[in-house]
Amino acid sequence: MMSPLPAPVRAALAARWPEVFPAEGDLDPNGPLVPADSHYDLAALLKEHGYLLYVTVVATHFPTPEGDTFEVATVLRNPSTGKAFWWRCKLGADPVIATLFPLFAGADWQEREQFDLVGVRFAGHPDLRRLMLPEDWEGHPLRKSYAIDTPHAPWR
Amino acid sequence: MTLNPWLHGLVYGLPVLLGVMGVGALASWWERKFSARMQNRIGVDVFGPFGVLQPFADALKMLQKEDLVPRGADKTMFFIAPAFPVVLCVVLLGVVPFAGYWDDTGTWAPAILISNLDIGILWVLSVSGLMVFPLWMAGWASNNKYALLAAMRTVAQGVSYEIPMVLAALVPVIVAGDLSIARMVAWQATHGWMVFSLPVVGFLAFVLFYLASLAEANRIPFDIPEAESELVAGVIVEYTGIKSGLFILTEYLHTFIASALATAMFFGGGHMPFLAGLPAIAQIVLSATAMLVKTSMLFVSIYWIRWSWYRFRSDQLMELCWYYLVPGGLVLVACTAVSVSLGWV
Amino acid sequence: MTLPHREADVTLPKPARKDPHVDLEKLDAAADLMAINMGPQHPSTHGVMRIKLWLDGEMIVKAVPYCGYLHRGVEKLCERLTVVQLTPIVDKHDYVSPMTNEQALNIAFERMLGLEVPRRARYMRTIIAEIQRIASHLLWLGTFTLDIGGTIGGGASLMMYTFREREAILDVFEMLTGARFHYNTHTVGGQRHDVPVGWPAAVKKMIDAVDAHMPEYEQQCYGNDVLVLRTKGVGVIDRELALELGLSGPNLRASGVDLDLRRDEPFSAYDEIKVNVAVATDGDVYARFDVRMREMHESIRIVRELIDSIPEGPICSQKPVKVPFAVKLPAGRQFYTAIETPRGELGTYVIGGGAEKGAAPYRLKFRPPSLHAMSALPYALVGHTVPDVVAILGSLDPILGEVDR
């Protein structure tokens, strides 16, 4: 559940990104859509405000008639209140987004998994290898363009 | 009585060897039933009454298994390494007196004993010191990193625990004034068992010897070389079939012999009260039974510990040896020497 | 191969946090390191995983875990299966606590759709979750001591006893659902199987047996000096690192973070009861062990508290499902929610409006606590020896089915 942000955090966010986080009213229940270049700064700001627990990162492929788009949702949790917060970033056909590894060590593996399965690259990641699939796997299975019965060596 | 050495070996050695092998097989069955009881299980119960023939079925199974030699292994070493521990165990058996009787002169004479070696204790310590070599050979020849790690641990552990073992064995040597195990038993038959004749020190020396034997025989909590939860199976990880079976047999034999030695050195061996005056043959049978009972009790206690304790880490094992057991052993030896020189024993 | 050389120890950089991506060439060019693979076939890897270790003597200089050996592409599969069809799939994720997997999934769908769950079903879910927690922790305790004590040793003895208790728990679940392991008893809006006659009595009997045997386990663990020696001060994960890594559940609480979603983000009937959260501060193997042992007591208490007060009423707010397309997720809706499983925060990120006219999720991402626990290995292992690997891995309690999905 998207819990309401505490007032100080809300104020800090509104001061920085007024178009995404209006000072009043509910936030987008699907997670606020943040410009991709603010991704790292937002995470850093939230970490300063007590969102210390790195929960997860989810990349999703949205094919559109104009071309591929991607969304990267990042979930953080405040361990003192226990409430989670997530935001989304929209990416284009060549999905690259800043890594959160310098802030959250756990981003290492989570981002590797999303790179592996969805093909979103995380700029600045120290070790961006496939996590689940073999190194020589072709393609990224969680893309909508990847048919569920795509043949792959050695089962080609 | 001087026999041809070959004949001597055959006449005295073979029965003891076969008996001990049988005891070893029975011991492995007993351990399985014992551990099953400890673990709320039934244990082996298919082959023979109460599954007592299971060890033989296991041996038969192991003989049929494919003999795999890993690529890159040192084949010669890999092949001969499993034979050595068994040989060394059998050699150790040679000096253990399994029974005795009061002879005409009123001294306790050994009965079931292959060789009454004058330097019995020295022999035991040096041979069990050799025990690390076949394990090292196996670990090195396997060309496996787990086996190599285990072999290095084995050597470190075997060499380290040799020292407390020597110190513990020195206590009965000083008290009895003899290196021969048979004469040590004879001393205990007239002066009382070692654990009691030297009030506290004797018991502590026994504990020290027991712990060092556990480590020498690679039993839990000191089974670092096998350590199957971290090193898979330790030095025997690459061995299959009867070769790994020989290593396992060695473990049983070694444990049994360590128990027998501890019995002979600290619990009077085959000595038991109320024997004097009986016919010699009855005395021998009764004392052999006493020896077996005492040894079995120690043997079972080793397995009791094995099935209820966890394993030390290798550095903690070394710490225990060098920080506690070795200084403790030195103190024990000093105490014994003082007691003996003051004539307290 | 050289003996552990002291010079190398001196030159090893000791940063505040050990960088798992350390370049071995830069670390110590002269060190004679041995690379060794623990796994994928190794008795103590709790499934199929591999840790590549670089050893200096027996000391670990670098550790790189590899997972994915059990990857079944479940998230891809989820894009084709409908909401109703998914429950039996997630049973196979964390195969040690299937019940809580089902709950995590169904609670996510219910919260997304705004569905009300009858109070009886919520009570049942809470009881089931707590019993499952006991079962999961019992299995963990058995395998943890197995790692420390060895398969032929004291560890195996304790494992046999914990399996005795776990067997009783599986019997209770069998009585409820008819299945021993892959239950498929939760559904969107409630439960499939109502409480059978005599079930509360059976649960109470089982709980009494577990409670009666807890002192036995504690005596065998806390009372064993070797276990304490092996676990204290080993594999320390400090509070900050634990939070950054996203550890959750007992692993996080052992590092001094008082976070439990049962209390902080209540699901099922946890808002009606008080949950005492076990927290330890050391962050070592012993702390994680201690937290889990205390959690078992708390679970026993919660089950006892709830089992007699299961309210009457319906068990499902939805009509019994006849077709797999009965429940549809709203298109364009995105949602993250999580529950506390025995291993920690099992989150579900759902995007609605997928295949089968919206009956399947567009994207379903699981947030497995075990994956985060495993990602702590490169940090926790460095500086320890090979025997500690199994102790640390066992204390983190990863289930590889859940890690790889």
Image (cartoon, rainbow, N blue to C red):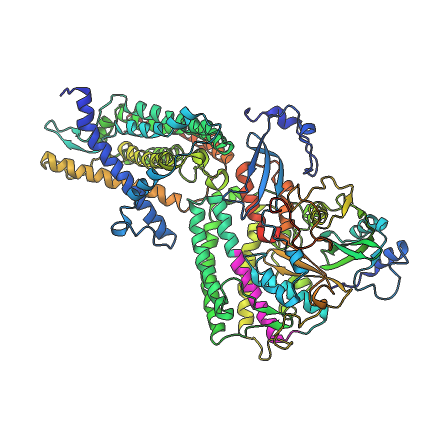
Farthest front residue in view: A156
Q: Count the labels in the image.
A: 0
**Would you say residue C337 sits in the magenta stretch?**
no
Q: Residue at x 75, y 44 (%)?
A: A101
Residue B25: give x, y in percent of width and height. Answer: 28, 40
Choose between C130 and B245: the one closer to the eye.
Answer: B245
Q: Is C121 placed above or below B29 here?
A: below
Q: Is C395 placed above or below C110 here?
A: above
The answer to whether any part of residue C280 appears in the image is no
For the stretch drawn in magenta, what is the main secondary structure? helix
**Would you say residue C129 sits in the magenta stretch?**
yes
Q: Quadrant of residue C355?
A: bottom right
Q: From which residue to which does the magenta span run?
A: C117-137
**In the figure, is residue B33 to the left or right of C355?**
left
Choose between A8 and C189: the one closer to the eye.
Answer: C189
**In the figure, is residue B285 to the left or right of C378?**
left
Q: Image quadrant for the N terminus of chain A?
A: bottom right
Residue C222: give x, y in percent of width and height. Answer: 49, 50
Residue C19: give x, y in percent of width and height. Answer: 69, 37
Q: Is B119 placed above or below C67 here?
A: above
Residue C166: give x, y in percent of width and height. Answer: 47, 59
Choose between A83 and C375: the one closer to the eye.
Answer: C375
Choose between B236 and A141: the one closer to the eye.
Answer: A141
Q: Residue at x 21, y 35 (%)?
A: B270
Farthest bottom residue in view: C313
**In the figure, is residue B76 to the left or right of B105?**
right
Q: Residue at x 25, y 38 (%)?
A: B22
The answer to whether any part of residue B130 appears in the image is yes
